[in-house]
Amino acid sequence: MAAVRRAEATWTGSLAEGSGMINNVTSGSIARLPVTWASRTEAADGRTSPEELVAAAHASCYAMAFSGDLTRNGTPPTSLEVDATVTFDKVEAGWKVVSSALTVRGVVPGIDAATFTTLAEAARDGCPISGMMKGNVALSVEATLEG
């Protein structure tokens, strides 16, 4: 069965001077998040951006995918800390999301650093959000095995 999720947003005014609001999401866990053009291209000033939300989606999706791969390897993680940095930049054709760089630090008993790195890269390619971005943006992962 397919999982379907929704988000609602409104925008008022021009691109540069206007503002928007993410009003609601399916789960109800996010509501009333302000967004502006300046929060995308300059300082956030307490507002979010589509790219920040993509970064959150990528980090959480990747954490789940990597945890699953580690568990299937017989080395379930004690903990994974994932950071996703999504870059929105002006290119010849206009503004574009150009990359998503993942950084993961993990505590995983019974695994060596080389296997950890190999599985980290596989998870980068296997995560559904990565799959959505693949071929459109540069994807990278830096993996560090701790403790």
Image (spheres, rainbow, N blue to C red):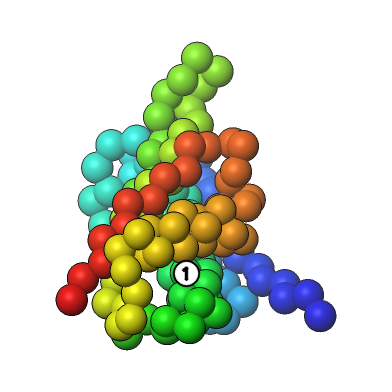
Percent from the top left, x then y, of residue 29?
47, 80
Badge 1 density bin: few <14, some 14–19, many ≥20, Cα 10 Å: many
Q: Is residue 94 above or below residue 102?
A: above
Total of numbered circles in the picture?
1
Quadrant in which residue 4 is drawn: bottom right
Residue nearer the viewer, 61 or 17? 61
Percent from the top left, x then y, of residue 83?
32, 59
Residue nearer the viewer, 86 or 51? 86
**Helix, strand, or loop for circle 1?**
helix
- Image quarter where the N terminus lies is bottom right
Question: Mark 1 = which residue?
Answer: 66
Q: Is residue 132 visible?
A: yes
Q: Residue at x 34, y 35 (%)?
A: 41
Q: Residue at x 34, y 74 (%)?
A: 111
Percent from the top left, x then y, of residue 35?
41, 52
Q: Is residue 109 above or below residue 97?
A: below
Residue nearer the viewer, 94 or 115? 115
Q: Could you tell whether 46 is left or right of 74 in the image? A: left
Q: Is residue 90 above or below residue 142?
A: above
Q: Residue at x 23, y 51 (%)?
A: 45
Q: Could you tell whether 8 is left or right of 14 in the image? A: right
Residue nearer the viewer, 20 or 13? 20
- Image quarter where the C terminus lies is bottom left
